[in-house]
Every structure is written in C-alpha cells, then in structure tokens.
Amino acid sequence: MSADKDEELKKIMLVEDDADIRTVATMALEMVGGMQVHAFGSGEEAIAAVAGVAPQLIVLDVMMPGMNGPEVLVRIRERVETADIPVVFMTAKVQPEEVERLRALGVLEVVAKPFDPMTLADTIKALWAKRPRG
Amino acid sequence: MPEVTNARVRARFSFSVKINFILGLGLAILVAVGTLAYRSIDELVDASRYEGTALIQLGHLEAFIAQVKRIESAQRKYVLTGSAADLSVYRAARVEASLDIRGMVSGVESLDQRRILRELERLADDRMRRLDTVAEVRAKAGLEAATRLVRASATDALNREIDTLAEQFRARTLRSLRVSQEDAAFSAGTTGFLIAWGILFALTLLVWAMVVIHRHQAHRRAAEEALRASEKQLRLITDAVPALIGYADREGRMQFHNKPFERWLGRPAERLHGFTLRNLLGTETYDRIEPHIAHVLAGQPAQFEFPFSSDGDRAGYFSAQLVPREDAQGRTLGFYLLITDITALKEVDRMKSEFVSTVSHELRTPLTSIRGSLGLIAAGVTGALPDKARQLVAIAVETCERLVRLVNDILDTERMASGKMDMKFEVIELGKLVERSIVANEGFAATHGARVRCDAGQPPLLVRVDQDRLVQVVINLLSNACKFSAPGGQVDVAIIRRDKWARLSVSDNGPGVPVNFRAQLFERFARSDSSDARRAGGTGLGLSICRGIVERFGGRIAFEERAGGGSTFYFEIPIVEQA
C-alpha cells in the first residue's frame, strides 16, 4: 500500500473480542480522535472484511478466542491487497519479552492496556506518522 | 571429622616426640657407658702394665743387691788368694752390677724412685771404687796391706746406706703398686656399677618404648575405628540427603559420590567411580556445563542450572553448585558437586509466573473498560457532568490508575524476585535521561501543584544502565516527591559526582519520613501508617522495585532527612569514564 506522506489517518479497523473495550476504544478513536472506526469482535470476521473495508491502519487485540492477533496478522500479510496495511497490537500482556516478541512480528508498535482514552487517538496518529513508507 | 583428624595428629605428634626422646636418651646412655667402660679398661691396662713394671724393677733391685754381695765375695776371695781367675770373676761381676743399676734407672718413670736409684747407684759406685782400691792394693802390696785397708775402710756404714735406700725403693714401689691396684679396682667397680645402672635404665627405656608403641597402636586403632565410624556416618548422611553430592578431581573423574548420584545416573557405584563427568553426563550436557567447570577449576565457586535426562525421558531441571578444593599452595585439586533437582521448583515458578501474568492480564482487561469509560466521561466526551458527579468520576479515575500501577508493580516485583527482569544495558548521559523523566512526570507534578527544578551539573556523567528502567526509578522518586510535597512546593533534582559514583537526588519539602518507618522504607509492601501516605495512594512496592533496579545497575539507593524539613531520596550508580 503506497501512502502519501501527509495523508491523514481517517479509517481504522479495530479487532477486539471484548465488547466493552471495543466500545470504549471505538468511542475514544471516533469522539476524541475524529476517526472512522470499523470494529470487529473476532479475527475471522476481521479477515473476512479487511479487503472490503480497506483500512489505513489496523488496531489488533492479541489474545482472542479462535484466531489470535498474531495469526490474524499473518493472514493479513499473506494477502497482497492487505499486506502493507500498518498494524498496531493492543494487549494486556505487557511483560517486556512478550512486547518484544510481538514487535518482532513486524507491527508499528504494541500499545498496552489499559490505555488512556483521551490520548489513544494521538498515540495511534503518532505511530501512523512514523510508519515506514513504501 | 575435623576432631578425629586433630586427635590423630596430636597422637602422632606425641608418639613421635616420645619415641625420639627414648631413642635419644638410650643413645646418650650407650655413649656414656661406653666411654666409662673404655676409660676403665684403659686404667686397668695401665695398672696391669705398672704392676708388671714394678715387679720387674723389684726383681732388678733384688738382683742388684745380690750382685753387690757377689762382688764383695769375689773381691774378698781375690784378696785372700790373689788368683788372677778370682780377679777376673770380680771384675766381670763389677761390670754386670753397673749395667744393672743403669738399666733400672732408665726403666723407672717416677722421679722420686729415679732419685733413690741414682743415690743407690752413687753409693754402689762408691762401694765399688773402695773394693777396686783394695783389689789394686792386694795386687801391688800383698795380702797384709790389703787386709789393713779393708779394716780401715768404713764399708759397713756404706752397706747400711745401700740397704736403707734399697728398702726405701722397695717400699715406695710396693705402695705405688698398691695405690695403682686400688685405683684400678675402684674404677672397675664404679664402671661396673654405672654399666649395671645403664643397663637397668636402658631396660626401663625399652619397656617404656614398648608401652608407648603399644599405646600408639591402640590410639591408632581407635582413631581408625573413629574415622571409619565417621566415614560411615558421613556416608549415611550424604546418602540420606535428597541431593546429589560428589567430588571430582582435576580431570573431572568422580572420586566420591552418594547413593542419589547412582540413582540419578542409573549406574552402580563401580560404573560411576573414576568415570569422567563427560562420560557420565554425555557430551551435549557436558559441553553446556564445561564453562562452569573451567570456572571452578580456576578456583572460583560456580552455580548454574541445567536440564538433564539420564534415561532419555523428559529432561528434569537441576541446580548445581561447584566448590573448588585447594591445597595449601592454593592449587585447585578438584571440586565438590552439589546438585539438586529443581524440576518441581521450576514448574512452580513457571506456574507462578503464568498465574501472575494471567491475573495481570485478566485484571487489565476489565480495567481497560473501566479506565476508558471513566476517562471519556471525566473528560466530558459524553457530555458535561454535574460538579459532584465529576468529582466522583475523578476519584474513580484516580483509583483505577492506582489499580493499574499496583498490577504493574506486582508484575515487576514478581519478575525481579524470579530474576527475570532482563536489562538492556547501554551507556547514556544521566542528565538527559533525567530531563526525559522530568518531562514524562510533568503532568503528574502539575496535578499535585509541585514545581520541579533540575540541576544536572557539569560535566555530563555517563552511566551504563537500562534506560527504561532508570526512567522508571527517576519517575518513581519524582512522583513520590510531588505527592508528598506541600501544595505549591518545590522538588529539587540534582546530579553530582562523588568519586567514581554518579549521585542523583530528589528532594522535597514534605513532611519527611516517620522515624519508625525508615528501616523498612525500601521493603516490599512497605507503607507508612500516616494519613499523608494513605492519601498519597502508593502501592507499597515502588521503592522496593527502585532498589532492585538500582542494585542491578551496581548501585545503591538511600534516604536522608533534608535540612530545613522534607526528604531527600538518592541513588548512586557507577560512572563510565569517557575514553
């Protein structure tokens, strides 16, 4: 996916199995960050929809029933049309070696839960601005 | 064991001293008795020689006296007969008598005896000359003239003098002989007495030596028995210990092992003793632990963990401690092994870590919803709140933050306790890192109305640390200082150099640390009972985590009262000198 240098982050896909967190994160990104959020409750749903949604960035929970975050990432990277979409992991597993392991999978960053809803959008936008350009 | 060894050393020392003493004394007695015997024999020989000489001299004296009588008889016969034959007999006897007396004089050693003999010789010469004169008168003037001359000469007085001197010589010789015999007898008696006592004493020494040897052998048998008992006891203890105990020499050959060692390796003693660790553990395991063995052979104790399976089943986990054994010169002779099975501990540790991780995750998940929801409500994203509701929501947000911090601190504490807190060490400038921490803490300081002033000092100090962990320490100290400062108070941060250490101090003007709380300030879950501390809402883990991190940097953390009120928390870490 080629991206314009000054392209604004508008469309995000959020994959989170916990409905409450999904709601809070969606509200934080939409109401505070002014972004359009496409939220999904499972990895399978997200994979099925990602090509159609064509998000600029995906915020992906790590531990989910069924297909977990890293598995979803692999599937997204396998498909040509979604392979270049930047991904940010969001997880409550915050031990350093776990964070390192997730970073090594080729994501922009790992955001820890719980997050501050008032700064989450800014954090995501800052990561978006630092994404590698192809 | 050491007591038995000491007793054996003492017994051996005592035995050695006693036997050497007995041998020395025996030798001294032998030398003394030998010397005395030699001297006594020498004296006896001298006495015997003197006795022979004295008897010969007495014989010579009697012969001389008899010769003098024969000369007188020959001279008188010649005077009466005037025969040339009688004259010739007289002269021959005269010459013989002169030779006898000279021989006697030269054979006598005593000066007194020699004086007597010389006097006797003189008198005899005088007597001979008178006889010669009579013989000459007889030859020239005839019998009557010679007879008159004989009657006129006072020969009787001269003969008496000769007899008196002969008697003196005889008496003195006999007295000397008696004295010599008495001396020899005394010497022989004394020597015999001393030899008898020497033999008696030597026999006593011999008996003593036998007693000492017998006792020594009894002691040795007892010591050997005690050693065997001690070894047996040690063997029972080491066999009963639920750990592998062994000793290997420099070549890594097992020279001692307990029963659990045999069970662990599944080998009988005869297929274990003398075998190398490489042979016993297999090349793969040995290659893994070889650096530690090299370490202990260099004289340093080693401790490590390693997986091992003796029968190809699932590998267990083992903790090994290697302790060098050195001789008096400090050369490593081998090393002791203490190996314990920590498979169960590892499993418990893994379960604990997993439990803490899972609990942490499971707590964070609902906290994310709560924190997120409250954050949005408090910020007014969902609409303006009445004042009281906003106040309550703010309390809920703060409490939620405390819960998050508690979960984080518990995770850190668990990681530190289990030694899993990995550090990415790099050399950084301490001042810049502190400034970064102050910036990160700005919001928190503002919340508490505290101003932070920093004096980073000059020149910049380099330290080797894990940046994130050091920031965690600085932020913890800063947030504590802000929390406990009086409203509008000032927090001073300073970096100074103290010898080879960089000291970072954070000072506040708060109420200080209660005296009865200072001792456990850096302990886990240490919290002051003061209402200020309760209000500050700490987890009781922050400072213990700070101490753990600073100690991993090779430094120390401490507290001191600040002059004029308040507290100063500081840590010191080693400076990396610029090349």
Image (cartoon, coloured by chain):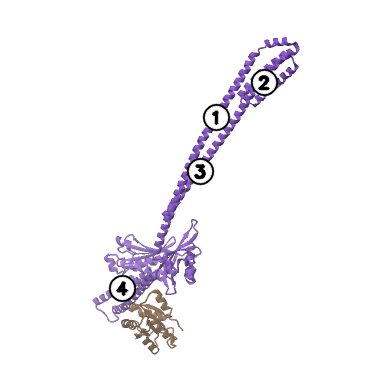
Q: Amino acid at mark 3?
A: Gly
Please report the residue visible at 43 percent of the width from the left and 87 percent of the height from the top.
A79
Residue named by callout 2 = B67
- SS at mark 2 in the image: helix
Chain identifier matching the brown colour in the rendered picture: A
| First reached walking from the N terminus: tag 1 or tag 2 | 2
Q: Quadrant of residue B484?
A: bottom left
Question: Where does label 1 land, which residue?
Answer: B183
Report the disc number at residue B24: 3
Which mark identifies residue B403? 4
Taking depth in this image into account, of B190 and B70 the one nearest to the observer is B70
* Residue A8 visible in the current orientation: no
* Secondary structure found at label 3: helix
Q: Are marks 3 and 4 in contact (CB under 8 Å)?
A: no
Q: Amino acid at mark 1?
A: Asp
Determine whether, in the image, residue B9 is placed left or right of residue B98: left
Local crowd at mark 1 within 10 Å, few (<14), some, or many (≥20)? some
Instruction: Decide: is B278 above or below B110.
Output: below
